Amino acid sequence: MNRKRFMIVLLLGAIFLLSVVYVFAIDDDQAGQASDLPMANVVNDEGGAAIISGELAYSNPFFTFGVSQPVIILEDQAGFIDRNEFYLFPKESQVLAQITSDFLESPFSYSLTLPVIPQGTLRDVDNDGETDTGLMVFSVAYWSNTFGDPFLEERDLFGGGWSTAYATTISSRDPELRGELVGGHFVIYAPDDQQGFPSGFGDDGLLFTEDDPIVRVPAGYSVVDINSEPFTFDRSREHDLDLLEPEGAALVDYSDLSYTDAFDSMVEKMRNEYAFTDYYELDWDALYETYQPRFAEAESNRDEVAFALALRDFLWEIPDGHVSMSLGLIGEFFQEETAGGLGFAIRELDDGRIITTFITQDGPAEQAGIELTAEIIAFDGRPLPEVMEEQFIWAHVAYGSPHTLRLQQLRYVTRFPANTDVEVTYQNPGDSEPSTVVLSTSDERDSWASSSFNVAVSGLELPVEYEILPSGYALVNIYSFSDDAMLTVQLWERMLGLFNQAGVPGIIIDMRNNGGGSGFLSDQMAAYFFNEELELGQKGFYDEEVGEFVFDPRGIEHFFLPSEDLRYNGDLVVIVGPACFSACEFFTYNLTLQDRAEVVGHYPTGGLGGSVDDFVMPEGIGVRFTVGRAVDMDGNIHVEGQGIAPTIRVPVTEEALLGESDVLLEAAIEHLDNQ
C-alpha cells in the first residue's frame, strides 16, 4: 500500500471512530437523562402484561339499546394526551377483545390478549423539553360498532376523542374538567427502558401536563393504577380490570325508599333535571303540595295500588309525551276502563264534524242503525267535544302536542267499562235530522284497534323497507330508529346504493309509523342526503355543579358524511303523522334544512323533542322523563310540544279518511311529478 492510500484509509478510520464515539456520546447523554429519573414504583414484576380480562356491569336501561356488535378494544389515548376531541383511533391500534359471556346480561365478561408489538401512537409525555421516542398509552374501553367494518370509524366514535364512560379510566364530573381522566387504570407500552411517565397528577390535578412528576418505566407493558399515590406500575402477566359505569350513567334507584321519601327524591330530581320546566310553566312546589298527601296516605295504608295511581296522576300533570311510567300494578284499571266499545271509531274533519270512520260488524252501533260517516254529535246529551275534554287518556304519549292529544281523545271517548249504557246522538249521511239511541257497550276491540296510530304496523317489519312504485319513485318506510342499529345502517346503505345505480328520480320516505329511538342514528341516516357536514342543533343538560342547564358548544350535533357513492342527491318527500315521535321528528327536521325535502301530512309530528333518562320507584315502577332540552342552532325549542309541521298539508276530509287510495302518498307523488 502506498503512502497516499495509507493516509486515506487512516483518515476514513478516524472519521468512523469519531462518528461512533459521537453516537455513543449522544446515546449515553440520553440514557443519562433518562437514568436521572427515579424508577417507577413497579409491583409484581413478571416481565409485563400479556392478558387483560374483567367485567362490565351496567344498570342503565339504554346500554344495550340497538346494539348488535358490541366491542371492547385497546383504546389509544393519544387523543386525551393531546386534548384532541376529534382524535380517531387508528384501525391498526384497535385490538379487539373477546366478549366471553352474554352481553345482554349484566355483568358481562371480556378477555383481551395484548399484541407483542402494539400499533398505537407514540407520545413523549416526560415534559423534559427533549424529543424522545415516547411510549403508547391505552385504556380498555367499550364501544358499539354500527358503521362499516368491525373496527371503529368516525361515526362509531361520535366524531372522535377518548372514552369518558365504560372504560378502565374514570372521567371527572366537574364541568370545568370536561373529559379529564382522573382515576382508573391505563395500559402503557414502552419500546425501551428510557421513557418517562407521570407518577402523579401534579399541582394542577391534571394528567399529562407540565407539572407532572415523572418516573422512568420498564420496557414493555405495564398497567398503571392512577388511583394510587404515587401511581403504581403493575408488571403481572395477567390482569383483572373491570370497565366502569360512570355515576352519571348509572340507573338511579329509589325502590328501597318509603313512598314519601321516594316521592320527595323524585320531585327534587325532576325539579332540577327536567328539561322543559319553563317551557311548560310547571310549578313543582304546587305539584308537590297537591300530591304529597296522596303518597303519605298510600304509605300509611301500605296501599301499593294507591301509590301507583298517585304516581300516575302526578306524572300525567306534565304535558310531555316522553314522561311516562310502567303500568304493571294498574294495568288492570286500563283494561277495565276501556273494556267496552260502542262499535264505532271516530275522527274529526277539517270542517269541524266528527264522523264515524269504522263500524264494527254486528256491533252495538250497526245494530242500532248508525252508519259509516255518520256525524256523532253528543254523548248522554252533552256535546262530544265537551265530553272529550274531560276524557282521561292512558296513552301519555298523547300529551306531546295539542293535535296528538285531540286524536287520542277521539279514540278514548268511545271506550267505557263493560256493560255501560251510553246515549248517542248522531246524524247518518242523508238524514235531515239527528237521531238519539241508547247503546250498551260490548266487548269489542275492533273499533279500538282501527283507530290506533299504528294500525298499519304488524310488528314484523324490518327497520327499513322499500319498493319501487309504478311512477318510478321509491317508497321507503323507516319503521324504527331503535332496532338493531347495524342492520338498520346496512339496509339503508344497500338501498341507497341500489337507488343510485338505478337512477331512481325521487324518494318518498314514509315516517308515519316511526316511534323514534336513537337520535344520533336518525341524524346520521339523514346525512346520506347532504353534501355538507351541517350543524343540526344541540341539547342542554342540567349541571349540578353550576345548578342550571348547560349548552356545551362542544356538544353541537352535526352530520358525518358517508362516502359519496352512498349519498343520494335526487328529490325527496317525507310523509309524517302524529305517530312520528322523537328521533323520527329530528330526522324529519334535518331534511327540512336547506329545503332538502318537502314534508307531507295531515298533522305535524308528535312533538317529543328531548332525550330521556329512567329511574326506579318503589314497587319496581320504572319512570322515564326528559333530561335533554333539544334546540336548533338559533337556540330555539323546535320540536317539543309542537312537532314538525307539514310543508304540504293535506286536508282531513271524508275521502282522505275513507277513500280507497292513500291521499298522503298521492300528494307526495304529485309533488315529485311537478319538480
Image (cartoon, rainbow, N blue to C red):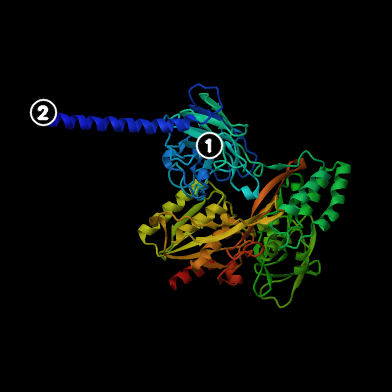
Q: Which residue is mark 1?
A: 139
Q: Residue at x 47, y 59 (%)?
A: 533
| Mark 1: few/some/many CA within 10 Å (<14, 14-19, 20+) | many
Q: Does the image show residue 480?
A: no
Looking at the image, residue 154 sits to the left or right of residue 284; the answer is left
Q: Position of residue 384 (x, y in %)?
A: 75, 68
Q: Label 2 amino acid?
A: Asn
Q: Position of residue 150 (x, y in %)?
A: 45, 41
Looking at the image, residue 120 sits to the left or right of residue 58; the answer is left
In this rendering, the answer to whether 151 lies above or below 44 is below
In this rendering, the answer to whether 342 lies above or below 81 is below
Q: Residue at x 50, y 34 (%)?
A: 196
Q: CA distance from mark 1 to mark 2?
A: 66 Å
Q: Nearer the viewer, residue 554 or 254?
A: 554
Q: Which residue is mark 2?
A: 2
Task: Specify the quadrant that holds the C terminus.
Answer: bottom left
Contact? badges 1 and 2 (CB < 8 Å): no
Q: Label 1 amino acid?
A: Ser
